[in-house]
């Protein structure tokens, strides 16, 4: 495709993509992409929780859930979300839930699921130790065989608030509920029983803080998975029956008519991806985004999350009372800053202050709690790079202590092959693209420039022949999300948009656009790190539109620069003869 034809095609795709995104804007200003998020994992968790919390009052919901799981079991015997290959964790927990609540009716489904779980590698194929422990627990409930002994969850850990927060982060309320349940059923000596008595009020205080700060709805972070695990732990502990009743009621109300439970709603996440793309596409002044700005204002948390030691000023994934997320806080702050009046928006200042207060001592950012232990909720290169971008957008310079410390940490976390990790997305492409942009914008030294060059080279080296990107590993087909991340990261690093690799990526994204203006998603998003993924239309569409809009801007800038150069050198009509 000639350059002029590509430019025209990109422009057409941007217009169609922007209109498609705006069609998902709700009256309250949020962008919502709610279809196809039924989750067999969340359904299994909810069924198990309701069985222990209120089996009689939940009989109808349990019956519908069993029917849905049986009807959606795949031919291979397993389960996963739409467009996601069968997963061992989801398959194991669905089998346990069916065995627990409907052993006769679902006997054949359970047998097929257990066979598939073993074919996938069993518990050894689940990379997260806490999820392996959860499989053992669910299989114990259901009377199914499992490998290994159930690990003890020391309730007394909660007597050390700072340590427990750093070790557990957002898992703290789940841990509190599960450890309470374990303490009610596990035999301990006199010292152990005394420690449990001391720690029990602390565990209950953590759970009540999370419950009450969300308006005592019974839901926890608007998430059926979190709510189910907390409800299950409390129900088995015999503690806080009012919280158990409320959580069970919330789970029943959150069930879909078909009997399944969805993923948690991602109102803030979807809105951030869509709005950032629309701003890049030149729609910052669109009157429809006035309500979106107000929606983001409403969803910023005005109160601290005391149980987690988090100050006020953050955003979460979903509701106005959801749990803190550093990435959503950075993205919401950056978006509000770029909307009209953003330079004077107090919500931007509050978000940036929260990020400043929660920066890890090493310079990175963890998911929510400062100085979280490395791992599933700890420091993340992609998240750190995105926060660096938000700080730079706000006017911080490369020598700002927050930025300088973060860049130094990023350089130290680069892998030998030049790539960077992303905690909540698969493979190396999203982390490497984000880090490349941050290093290009904020790098000050030769070491920083070398790190950026290695990241750029890794992206170019892992590009598919058709112009797309995937994980950077093996021969997986290219995806919209990973191609968009790579294109944006490379554009930030300075190559001309006419570079064949960049032009091919833009062309691939244009060709991948659907007739309705959207893009097909791939399972690149982690719901549970390394264990459960989902494909999301809103994230795919937002990334693709933003990358193409950035490509169009870079092309326009390059064209204007070339024209000025011709005028100055006399090669153009405006130059000297």
Image (cartoon, helix red, strand yellow):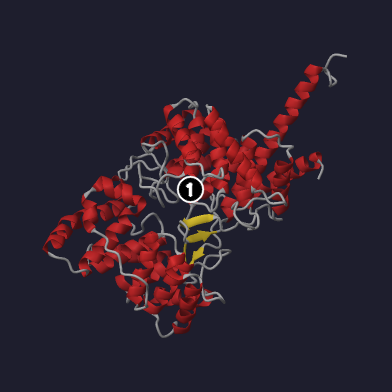
Position in image of residue 232 (x %, y %): 32, 66
Determine the residue positioned at 42% across, 64% down.
Answer: 254
Residue 57: give x, y in percent of width and height: 33, 74
The quadrant in which residue 450 appears is top right
Q: Can residue 131 be seen at all in this image of the molecule? A: yes
* Residue 275 vertical placement versus 118 (above, below): above
Q: Local crowd at mark 1 within 10 Å, few (<14), some, or many (≥20)?
A: many
Q: Looking at the image, which residue is at 43% across and 65% down?
A: 42
Seen at 34% across and 78% down, the residue is: 143
Residue 341 appears in the rendering: no
Outermost residue toward the left in this view: 190
Q: Outermost residue, right direction?
A: 577
- Of 536 and 488, nearer the camera is 488
Query: Quick one: SS at disc 1?
Result: helix
Q: As rendered, which of 157 and 395 lies closer to the eye?
A: 157
Which residue does the numbered mark 1 point to in the structure image? 268
Quadrant of the snapshot with the N terminus: top right
């Amino acid at each position: 495709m000639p350059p002029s034809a590509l430019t025209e095609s990109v422009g057409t795709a941007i217009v169609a993509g922007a209109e498609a995104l705006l069609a998902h804007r709700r009256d309250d200003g949020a962008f919502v992409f709610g279809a196809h998020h039924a989750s067999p994992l969340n359904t299994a968790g909810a069924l198990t929780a309701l069985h222990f919390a209120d089996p009689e009052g939940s009989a109808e919901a349990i019956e519908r859930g069993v029917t849905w799981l049986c009807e959606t079991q795949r031919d291979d015997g397993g389960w996963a979300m739409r467009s996601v290959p069968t997963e061992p964790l989801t398959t194991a927990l669905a089998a346990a839930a069916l065995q627990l609540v409907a052993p006769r009716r679902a006997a054949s489904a359970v047998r097929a699921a257990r066979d598939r779980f073993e074919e996938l590698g069993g518990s050894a194929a689940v990379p997260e130790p806490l999820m392996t422990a959860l499989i053992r627990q669910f299989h114990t409930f259901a009377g199914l065989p499992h490998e290994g002994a159930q690990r003890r969850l020391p309730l007394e850990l909660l007597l050390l608030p700072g340590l427990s927060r750093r070790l557990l982060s957002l898992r703290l309320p789940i841990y509190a509920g599960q450890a309470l349940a374990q303490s009610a059923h596990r035999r301990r000596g006199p010292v152990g029983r005394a420690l449990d008595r001391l720690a029990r009020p602390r565990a209950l205080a953590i759970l009540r803080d999370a419950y009450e700060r969300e308006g005592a709805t019974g839901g926890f972070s608007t998430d059926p998975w979190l709510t189910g695990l907390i409800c299950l732990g409390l129900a088995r502990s015999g503690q806080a029956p009012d919280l158990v009743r409320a959580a069970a009621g919330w789970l029943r109300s959150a069930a879909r008519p078909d009997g399944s439970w969805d993923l948690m709603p991602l109102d803030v996440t979807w809105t951030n991806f869509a709005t950032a793309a629309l701003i890049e596409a030149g729609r910052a002044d669109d009157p429809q985004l006035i309500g979106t700005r107000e929606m983001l204002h409403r969803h910023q948390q005005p109160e601290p999350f005391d149980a987690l030691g988090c100050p006020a000023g953050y955003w979460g994934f979903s509701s106005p009372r959801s749990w803190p997320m550093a990435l959503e806080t950075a993205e919401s702050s950056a978006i509000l800053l770029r909307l009209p009046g953003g330079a004077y928006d107090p919500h931007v200042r509050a978000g940036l202050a929260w990020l400043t207060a929660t920066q890890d001592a090493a310079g990175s950012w963890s998911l929510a709690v400062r100085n979280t232990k490395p791992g599933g909720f700890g420091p993340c290169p992609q998240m750190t790079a995105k926060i660096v971008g938000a700080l730079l957008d706000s006017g911080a310079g490369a020598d700002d202590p927050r930025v300088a410390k973060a860049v130094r940490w990023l350089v130290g976390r680069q892998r030998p092959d030049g790539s960077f990790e992303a905690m909540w997305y698969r493979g190396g492409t999203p982390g490497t693209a984000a880090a490349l942009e941050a290093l290009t914008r904020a790098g000050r030294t030769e070491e920083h420039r070398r790190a950026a060059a290695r990241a750029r080279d890794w992206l170019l080296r892992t590009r598919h022949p058709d112009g797309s990107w995937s994980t950077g590993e093996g021969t997986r087909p290219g995806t919209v999300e990973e191609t968009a991340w790579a294109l944006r990261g490379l554009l930030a690093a300075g190559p001309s948009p006419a570079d064949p690799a960049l032009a091919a990526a833009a062309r691939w994204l244009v060709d991948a656009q659907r007739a309705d203006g959207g893009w097909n998603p791939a399972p690149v998003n982690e719901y549970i790190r390394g264990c459960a993924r989902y494909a999301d239309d809103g994230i795919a569409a937002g990334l693709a539109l933003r990358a193409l809009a950035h490509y169009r801007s870079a092309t326009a800038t390059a064209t204007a620069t070339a024209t000025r150069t011709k005028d100055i050198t006399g090669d153009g009509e405006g130059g000297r003869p």
